[in-house]
Amino acid sequence: DELGDAMNDILIHSFRKCGKAGDYRMIMSLMDAAIEFCHGQPILSPRVFREALDALAQTDAGSSKLNRMWKLACSGLNVLSGPVGAFELNIMLKSLGETHQKVGAALELYRSSDIIGDCYTASTLLNLLAFSIHENQEVSKDWKINESETFSPCWQYEQGVRLLNDFVLQGNLNNFVFSSALKLNERASEVFNQPGRRHKGAKAALSILGIMKACNILPDEITCSHVLSTFDKQHEWKAALTMLHSMEKQKLFDEKLPTWHLPKPNTYAYSAAISACARCYEFDEAMQLLKRMQKDGIETNTWVYNAALSACVSPIKKNRLKRVETALSLLDQMGSGPEHSAPDTVSYNTVLAAMEGIGQIFRDRKGCRICEVNETEVGNTIWIPSETLVSEILQEMSSNGIPRNALTYYNAIKASKSNSQAIFRYLDEAIAEISLSSQTDISNESSLTGRAADGLLFVFNAALSTFGKGGDIDLIVRCFELMHITNTEPNHESIFHLVLGLGRGHNSRNILTLLKSLQGDQAASSILNEQYGLKPNYLLRQNSKEVEQLYAVSISACLGVTDIESATAVLNLMKENGVAATQSTMSEVAFAYTQLAVKAASRQSIIRRKLGQHGLTEDLRREGRIAKAHAERSSLTVQELRDPSAKLLSALSGAFAVTEDYARARSILKGLHNRAVAQQSDSMLLSRSYQEIMNVLPGLHRSLLKICASYGNVTSAFSFVKDIQSFANEISSEGNELRLADAPLIADVSEPMEQNKNSELLFTRTHNDTARKIGMRGEDWKLLLIAASKSGDWKLCINTIQFLRPFVKATHPRRAPRKDSEYLSRNYRKLSRSLTALLLCLEARGQDAWAVRAIDDWIEWSGRRPPKEAVLTTIRMHASEDRGEAVNALINQILSINPSTADRGANAQHTYEEIIYIGGITHLHKNGLYEDADELYLEALTKRHLPFNTSTTLEDGQQKLDLHGMNVAIANSAVRTAFQQQILQSEESTDLIIVTGRGINSFYQLRPIIRPEVQRMLLEEFYPPLSTTSIPGNMGALRVPSDDIQKWALHQRQQRGVKMLTLADALKNLSGERLKRSSQVIARNKEKE
């Protein structure tokens, strides 16, 4: 025993020395000598072979040496004091996989071995599988054969599932094993994330979590971080929030925790959830998570802040200023916080990226940077251009010693918009960071990947992109000159921006010259040099993908400015040089033609609106012919494609629709419907083509209905609606889409999870979710109703409004506690246009009874006031039927409803009540219902809904009535009311000054409208007539003499007396008649007795 222990110790130390020295020959020789020395006696410990394998892994020995050593250990020699176990197996597997990248051999060794592995074995194999996944890896052969939900395109993950199932049966599992499995799943999600080869990482992560629960293994923070990180990479922000909420629930259990539960969230869990929200542009959710962290006292480090800052970067224009202001505020918090939350290069780069596209930056008196300023605060702020703020941020980075890389200057250029001076200043700063000799480029940092790794070229392309979009060829040439000075060679992206600049700058004819120059044509190069001083140091590589893309971009640039001749010349050059027109190139051409058709149709619509009812003109016919020709060319190009994309077919359908060729537009739509149904029925997998069709169809449906509504073509609109509804029913009945439910994925982790045969989490099946997405929505029904309204089909309007009922009910204010009230009001305003269209149609058809019913139903459904336009339409209908009392009743009914935010339109200058009262008075006046108009006017004044001061005031011994800001109807009611309510009851008799204005704000400037109307009314509607005179020096006022006023008042009093006597006689006669009738009744009663 003493000899064996001594020999084992010597061998172990010798193997370690040889491993460090890299001498694998000595290791093999020592092992052979030790086996020979034992002479068949069980002296050697299995640890000796473990150390020998570990030492071989540190040397240059090939896998064959490892296999020989393993065979020696497992050959059944009598020299071992015990059998080889899991420890030795783990070292062998790790050596094969990590050192020699032979993961397949490691898996084969494990499966062929009789040794039972432990938890470390499972973790090692899963880590090796994750390590072996590389970028641009092909999908597995099994997945190509059977593309279903249960298979992954990553073969490593499929092997990992098999391993995990094996170890579940053995019971050798712990948190490290599941963390390795989740890491493998996360890596597969990173690599296989393209349509058509997407690994369903979110579903797989939840399945693994379900297996942990079935095995009663509590997940730790690392395990949950891997799950949340997978949700982040899979764009499943709702799932991430749901899981984080489940983790936060554990805070409620102080002592008594459920049997199986998630851990409390830490910094990394919050960071992953914030990153998931940011990746899906859920800005508000990300900011709420950050506030929740700070409120709960959880440490917020630089990593967390950077995740929150990334939520401020979004292509969505809405609330862009709010996001930028939040980013600047977060940056200030990081700068004033502890060291572990200090901003780094990523922080500043993200803030600069968030600033792209903004122009209004302000600074308050304290020097704080703000973006959104109220009108009352403008005087307390100083406006600064966005590029000034960009320069301040770059200077702040320099002052704090934070390095700037290529991405920094890229974002700075993008944030400076079209300020060429600032852009070239940033280019100079970027060049200054690079030594002109052999120093390292600014992009040579491990954090930069993709295009940003190109360094200075990446920055130059940002400037070229900005100048190219602006079409400023001089700035592009200057940028190329600077590239030549700094020895920065352009790439294909640089040339793309140059082509785009030539097209946008209306120099599309020189695009052909540029292409010839890039092919080595000296004559073309001389022309470019003479015209622009341009010497692009770049030659096209034949038969490369970049060449095909360049031709496609060139053709699109020419067609974008309607230069069909140059586009055709580029296409011919492409054929001459033997470059086959690829599917992508032809698709670009076809798509450009559809855009030209839409533009021509848009010009035609503008001309038609200007003409009104004046008929056709040559310009109108010409634009119509151009639109149809472009749509036809696009169709011919699409026919040459083998498999046109759904996006292209959608654009072509829209092009046919705007040219009023609805039959062909409908044919394309039905073709897309049939393709989607066929692909869904063929396989359970939602293929890339199927997903593309389903993503395109909702927009296409809405676009076609909008075009029909614009042209008032109800027949085509109704046909499209039938197709859409039929497709929605068919798609929902063919099969159910398996998806991550919008409802909580882990509703309550304290409850047991259901497991299927494969120990996978059961997902919610939604039968009608797909149908709801591609079926008719509220906006679509509204467009059908508008088309019917313009066509005058009031019966179809009445029927269609019923389909809007559930959508209108969904905006009821009682839903406000569950949903944001502003969100509901915004949806209500979108749908309210349908009620206006319905009432306009009913007005044209004289269906006032249906109008009243529609108003009542709308109020019942929405619980809100109807839109102002709809109410005014109904008022106009009542007034035209001489129903003044109905107008007053309608207004009282509407205004009795509590107001909401939906009543206030964007930039509304007048209140809802003011518009309704003014409209009611105006329509009553136009239809001669003066008494009803005056009554409504007095009611509005009493309730203070009109902004006018119509009481007569005494100035310089004269009464004054100001009519400024009124229309004719309001002015008439104001004058009549003033005479009846104030002047008639006044004991004093003075001149009356009526201020009408000089017509400065009238449609025909300085041609007053109210003045002559008031004069007409005083002469024709008053008896005795009231004469008026102009006031010298004031053409905006009239004087009514006191003598005329006194005569009119006296006549009114006399008339009132005559009316009272007539009324008394009528009452007297009525009393006598009643007495006579009573006597006759009494007499008849006596006779009966």
Image (cartoon, helix red, strand yellow):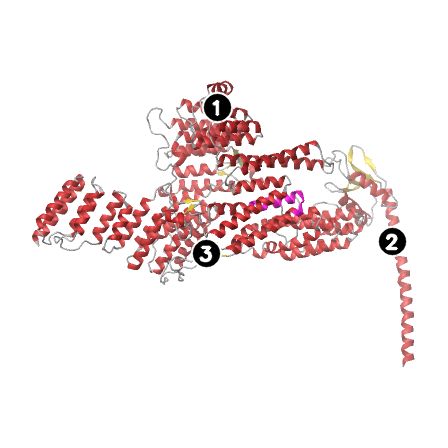
**First in residue order: circle 1 vs circle 2:** 1
Quarter-wise, where is residue 730 in the image? Answer: bottom right
Reading the image, the residue beneath label 1 is 516
Identity of the amino acid at label 2?
Arg
Identify which residue is drawn at 77% across, 36% down: 1008
Q: Nearer the viewer, residue 923 or 933?
A: 923
Cα gap from disc 3 to disc 2, whole angstroms? 77 Å
Pinpoint residue 543: horizontal percent, then vertical percent: 43, 30
Q: Nearer the viewer, residue 640 or 516?
A: 640
Residue 279, x across and y down, in percent: 44, 45
Q: Residue 117 location, x and y as percent? A: 25, 55
Q: Identify the amino acid type marked 1.
A: Lys
Q: Earlier in the sequence, mark 1 or mark 3?
A: 1
- Residue at left 21%, top 43%? 64
Specify start and end residues of the magenta stretch as a single range: 699-715
- Local packing at callout 3 (Cα closer than 10 Å; few below 14, some 14-19, many 20+) is some
Residue 418 seen in render: no
Q: Which residue is mark 2?
A: 1056
Residue 744 marker:
3
Kindly report the secondary structure that dominates the magenta region of the rendered protein.
helix
Contact, mark 1 vs mark 2 (Cβ under 8 Å): no
What amino acid is at disc 3? Answer: Pro
Viewer-nearest residue: 584 or 694: 584
From the image, state whether disc 3 or disc 2 is nearer to you.
3
Disc number lying in front (1 or 3): 1
The residue shown at (40%, 49%) is: 145
